[in-house]
Image (tube, helix red, strand yellow):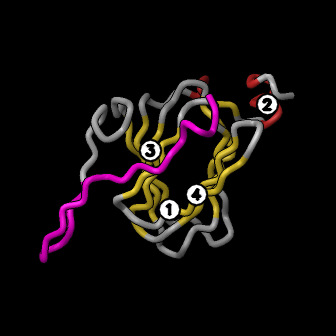
Amino acid sequence: MNLELCRTIELPKIDDPRGSLTFVEGRNHVPFDIARVYYLYDVPGGAERGGHAHKGLHQLIVAMSGSFDVVLDDGYEKKRFHLNRSYYGLYVCPMIWRELDNFSSGSVCMVLASNRYDEADYYRDYNDFLHAKGVA
């Protein structure tokens, strides 16, 4: 998989004077069925998250509150995405190294995932990831 498959997805946004509503449907707004939802919060200033790749997992990363950056790397090129709206998500396909940084105070990062947690699906060493991609 390459970086060109990763993209920002605009999610439905229903504006109302009482507050806006956004929803996500698997296989409709995202190109996978949603099997797991998790979120990151209380990330200390200057901290980084991620630092891994997945062998088969698809994800949609959403800034529910505040902002942060996601750096995606397919072994050949890197691209930085700034997420700061809860009605935009970043689709990350398998075999893409990801790092999250530049968290604003009070930010909340929600991730929709195609599979349940499986440690065997991770590349946690960047050189192992590059080797699997045939880059190293």
The residue carrying mark 1 is 83
Query: Helix or strand or loop: what does disc 3 sit on?
Result: strand
Above or below, 15 against 121 in this view is: below
The local crowd at label 1, few if under 14, some if 14 to 19, many if 20 or more residues have their Cα within 10 Å, is many
Question: Callout 4, which amino acid?
Answer: Phe
Question: Callout 2, which amino acid?
Answer: Leu
Query: Helix or strand or loop: what does disc 4 sit on?
Result: strand
Which region of the structure is painted magenta?
A: 1-22
In which quadrant will I find the C terminus?
Answer: top right
Q: CA distance from mark 1 to mark 3?
A: 12 Å
For image coordinates 48% across by 62% down, the residue present is 41
Nearest the eye: 13 or 33: 13
The residue carrying mark 2 is 130
For image coordinates 51% across by 30% down, the residue present is 57
Above or below, 77 against 103 in this view is: above
Question: Callout 3, which amino acid?
Answer: Leu
Residue located farthest toward the front when viewing the structure as drawn: 4
Q: CA distance from mark 4 to mark 1?
A: 6 Å
Earlier sequence position, callout 4 versus callout 3: 3
Question: Callout 1, which amino acid?
Answer: Leu
Query: Helix or strand or loop: what does disc 2 sit on?
Result: helix
Earlier sequence position, callout 2 versus callout 1: 1
Q: Position of residue 118 (x, y in %)?
A: 53, 27
Q: Which mark is residue 81?
A: 4
The local crowd at label 3, few if under 14, some if 14 to 19, many if 20 or more residues have their Cα within 10 Å, is many
The residue carrying mark 3 is 60
Q: Does the residue at mark 2 contact the one at mark 4 (Cβ under 8 Å)? A: no
Query: Helix or strand or loop: what does disc 1 sit on?
Result: strand
